């Protein structure tokens, strides 16, 4: 094999390595941009104010830069979503794994995954145009824009995240454990909750963490249906603003580029990034650590 | 175990079974209700004019022409950027990468990027492409932003597809004196093609539905023209839907529903193709 | 002169020594069988000759391996080596391509572009491996549509297409049914006219039927190496005797 051919091989390998570097550059880019711009922001707004002020009014004349209202909006919608998605998702996963016939599971699981494939604008529309009017019939006096409606819809959207991963985790548990439980006369319910779920716990935890991360980062459903009023509140019937919708709102507006108001999106973005970054890393390490448990 | 506990256990089991089934049916029904609601609201609006018209202040004259043109152009540019880089990166990491700390670092990194909220990619695109590189809120800026967003999907799918290629095929190739790149390009990648293709289609499906990052980089919400080159401003179908949904007039709501029907059909078609390809490929490789 | 030779060969997988000071010579145009119980090192030694062990991490190799008196580790380019020494594996591993493309693969690797040359070579190789009559009409069909025995003969054709002088076979018939297995044995018998063949097998009857000389390995050592007839009727070493008569392994 002549030298030119070996040289060509090395060149191709270097080219491919550069391609894989793009991901590293992306992460560096994100961290750099968010941090550098946020530092400029914090040069003008003390971190203490940012973390403790209970008002977020950068676009008004009386400017407050407290992140708490946006945080509460984000946490409120996320919590509602998780309260819907986790119980439903887990119970469905158990049902598919333990009770349903393989044929039923083979049909239902992909259909549920369709829920995850639907673009979020569609869910936003559904929340505003169907769910909110429906809720208004049940809860009189409910605002047209509120946190409950998008929260519930987000929850439905996230169910497949929990169901798919949890069902995979349950399926990975060795048959011998299940057979041992049945062999002792346990019912399916007892087997599922006393044996299978604990055994699959790491996979289930990963699925929940990923679901939370997904909910935290959701934008369009909330942008359409939650109204855009930053409020420090935990009342789901009020209209709220999340970190994500704030970022979109400012980008779409006429805020001049190097103004303090503009820099708020970086401070807000950094806050969001820190949360999801921590969650994603935790889930990665949990998954890695327990990946070889049953192999 | 005394019989009282036993029958109580059986009762719990039964109750749970039917509750769980109800939950499953509920989740499925929400999907059905969503589809029925949207189709009932928007189906009547769909006709050739809807596709051909530019957006307008008058709801019944508004159409998705520019949104579709913008979306397809955006997709085109996104794919020609993300595809080669993503696939080559995936091939490198899976086939050439050694099991060292650097490789695990990249793996963690990609897992992280996959979980970063899409608005953050929007901020990245806004700062890097729109401002620093002076691309403005153009198609190319949007394409680059989306390319970065979907790259982890393509890389992971490529890696999984390559991992599934049996080692015996590589051995056969090396045994005949082929070099690493010959083996990779002539045996491994062709064998992994089905899985890679599936990943590409799923990435496209994701890119089509993305709205938030494009809004952040400044994609316009009202675009009465068709973009002609990578430097033009643009809008996409999801953005158009967002625009119409935000209007109070009932006619715009109908437009939004109609737009959603088109968007859903495209999304479902793509996902269906991906599943079909994946199944065919899986059967082929697991001989 | 030996076609293929190992001199004081030692190999370690990490800390575990798999080959202990092995010296053996294979004559041209012969069939040599390596036999021995699982884990005795016969496959490991085989794979040294075409440097397939290079693909496994953490292996240490000492000693000399010679092809036509040239040292395969120091005197030769690894890609050249693998074209002069071909290998057939235990489980048939055709590429998920057409029958034609499988056999043509090696030719395309070495840069052969002439379509006529390729076509003729494919036909010749398939005839050599006694598969031509069965597939001449379906060359464009996927190789995976063939039966196990046909796939293995296809793999042999694929290996022969680039004109190696030595063919290493690692238990080529063990994954096949008895009829296909017999066809492979007939094939090996024919092939030795043109090629030098080394075959690893745990089927002693097969070794007895097919080979000129047999080498018996045990726990990484070469215990006995002699004419096949003699090995099976009057072995010198007691361990060989025990293995050959089925006392163990």
Image (spheres, coloured by chain):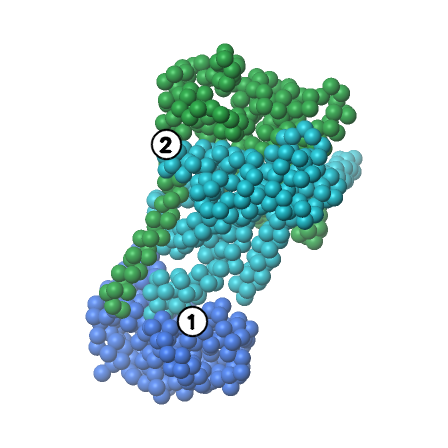
Chain colours: A green, B cyan, C blue
Could you tell me residue B172's position as x and y percent?
Answer: 41, 69
Q: Report if residue B252 is visible in the image.
A: yes
Could you tell me residue A54's position as x and y percent?
Answer: 52, 14
The total number of labels drawn is: 2
Name above or below for residue A292 compared with residue C56.
above
Whole-number angstrom distance, CA of label 2 to CA of label 1: 52 Å
Disc 1: CA contacts within 10 A as few (<14), some (14-19) or many (>=20)? many
Q: Quadrant of residue A193?
A: top right
**Relative horizontal placement of residue A257, taking residue B264 as reference (left or right):** left
Q: Nearer the viewer, mark 2 or mark 1?
A: 2
**Relative horizontal placement of residue C14, taking residue A255 as reference (left or right):** left
Residue sitting at x 42%, y 26%: A257
Q: Which residue was labeled with disc 1?
A: C89
Name above or below for residue A44 compared with residue A126.
above
Query: Label 1 marks which chain's residue?
Result: C
Name above or below for residue B202 compared with residue B142.
below
Q: Quadrant of residue A40?
A: top left
**Relative horizontal placement of residue C159, taking residue C2 as reference (left or right):** right
Residue sitting at x 38%, y 44%: A22
Identify the mark at residue A32; answer none if there is no mark. Answer: 2
Q: Secondary structure at mark 1?
A: loop
Disc 2: CA contacts within 10 A as few (<14), some (14-19) or many (>=20)? few
Residue sitting at x 65%, y 20%: A238
Residue sitting at x 56%, y 35%: B222
Residue nearest the observer in this picture, C33 or B124: B124
């Amino acid at each position: 094999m002549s030298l030119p051919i070996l040289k060509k091989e090395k060149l191709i390998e270097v080219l491919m390595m550069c391609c894989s570097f793009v991901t590293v550059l992306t992460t560096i880019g994100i961290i750099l941009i968010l941090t550098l711009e946020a530092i400029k922001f914090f040069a003008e707004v003390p971190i203490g104010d940012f973390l403790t002020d209970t008002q977020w009014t950068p676009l008004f004349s009386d400017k407050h830069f407290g992140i708490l209202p946006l945080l509460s909006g984000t946490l409120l919608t996320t919590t509602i979503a998780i309260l819907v998605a986790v119980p439903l998702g887990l119970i469905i996963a158990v049902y598919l794994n333990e009770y349903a016939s393989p044929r039923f599971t083979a049909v239902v699981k992909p259909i549920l995954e369709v829920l995850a494939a639907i673009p979020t604008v569609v869910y936003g529309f559904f929340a505003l145009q169907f769910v909110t009017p429906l809720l208004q019939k049940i809860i009189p006096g409910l605002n047209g824009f509120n946190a409950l409606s998008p929260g519930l819809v987000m929850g439905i959207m996230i169910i497949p995240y929990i169901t798919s991963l949890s069902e995979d985790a349950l399926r990975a548990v060795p048959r011998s454990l299940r057979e041992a439980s049945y062999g002792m006369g346990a019912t399916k319910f007892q087997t599922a909750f006393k044996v299978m779920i604990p055994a699959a716990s790491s996979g289930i935890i990963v699925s929940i963490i990923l679901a939370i991360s997904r909910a935290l980062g959701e934008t369009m459903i909330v942008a359409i249906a939650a109204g855009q009023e930053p409020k420090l509140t935990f009342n789901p019937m009020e209209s709220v603003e999340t970190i994500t919708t704030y970022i979109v709102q400012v980008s779409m507006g006429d805020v001049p580029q190097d103004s303090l108001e503009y820099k708020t999106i970086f401070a807000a973005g950094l806050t969001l990034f820190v949360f999801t970054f921590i969650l994603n890393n935790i889930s990665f390490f949990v998954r890695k650590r327990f990946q070889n448990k049953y192999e | 175990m005394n019989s009282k506990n036993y029958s109580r256990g059986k009762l719990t089991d039964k109750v749970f079974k039917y509750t769980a089934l109800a939950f499953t049916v509920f989740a499925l029904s929400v999907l059905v209700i969503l589809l029925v609601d949207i189709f009932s609201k928007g189906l009547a609006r769909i006709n050739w004019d809807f596709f051909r018209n530019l957006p307008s202040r008058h709801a019944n004259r508004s159409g998705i022409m520019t949104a579709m043109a913008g979306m397809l152009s955006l997709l085109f540019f996104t794919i020609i950027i993300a595809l080669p880089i993503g696939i080559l990166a995936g091939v490198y990491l899976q086939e050439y990468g050694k099991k060292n700390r650097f490789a695990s670092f990249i793996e963690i990194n990609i897992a992280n990027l996959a979980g970063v909220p899409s608005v953050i990619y929007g901020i990245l695109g806004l700062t890097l492409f729109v401002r620093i590189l002076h691309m403005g809120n153009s198609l190319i800026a949007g394409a680059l932003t989306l390319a970065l967003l979907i790259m982890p999907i393509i890389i992971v799918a490529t890696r999984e597809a390559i991992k599934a290629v049996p080692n015996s095929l590589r051995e056969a190739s090396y045994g005949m004196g082929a070099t690493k790149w010959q083996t990779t390009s002539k045996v491994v990648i062709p064998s992994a093609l089905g899985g890679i293709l599936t990943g590409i289609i799923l990435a496209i499906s994701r890119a089509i539905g993305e709205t938030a990052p494009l809004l952040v980089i400044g994609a316009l919400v009202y675009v009465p023209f068709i973009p002609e080159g990578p430097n033009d401003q643009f809008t996409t179908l999801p953005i158009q839907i967002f625009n119409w949904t935000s209007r109070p007039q009932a006619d715009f709501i109908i437009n939004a529903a109609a737009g959603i029907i088109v968007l859903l059909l495209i999304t479902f078609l793509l996902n269906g193709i991906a599943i079909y390809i994946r199944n065919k490929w899986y059967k082929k490789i697991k001989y | 002169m030996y076609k293929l030779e190992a001199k004081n060969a030692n190999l370690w997988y990490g800390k575990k020594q798999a080959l202990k000071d092995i010296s053996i010579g294979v004559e041209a145009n012969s069939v040599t069988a390596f036999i021995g119980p699982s884990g005795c090192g016969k496959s490991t030694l085989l794979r040294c000759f075409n440097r397939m062990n290079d693909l496994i991490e953490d292996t240490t190799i000492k000693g000399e391996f010679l092809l036509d008196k040239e040292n395969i580790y120091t005197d030769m380019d690894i890609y050249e080596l693998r074209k002069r020494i071909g290998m057939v594996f235990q489980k048939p591993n055709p590429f998920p391509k057409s029958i034609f493309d499988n056999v043509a693969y090696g030719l395309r690797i070495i840069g052969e572009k002439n379509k006529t040359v390729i076509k003729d070579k494919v036909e010749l190789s398939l005839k050599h491996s006694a598969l031509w009559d069965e597939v001449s009409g379906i060359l464009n069909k996927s190789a995976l549509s063939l039966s196990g025995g046909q796939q293995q003969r296809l793999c042999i054709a694929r290996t022969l297409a680039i004109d190696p002088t030595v063919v290493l076979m690692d238990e080529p018939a063990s994954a096949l049914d008895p009829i296909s297995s017999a066809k492979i044995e007939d094939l090996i018998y024919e092939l030795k006219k043109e090629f030098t063949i080394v075959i690893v097998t745990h089927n002693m009857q097969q070794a007895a039927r097919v080979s000129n000389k047999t080498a018996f390995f045990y726990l990484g050592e070469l215990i006995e190496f002699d004419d096949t007839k003699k090995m099976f009727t009057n072995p010198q070493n007691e361990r060989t005797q025990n293995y050959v008569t089925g006392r163990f392994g």
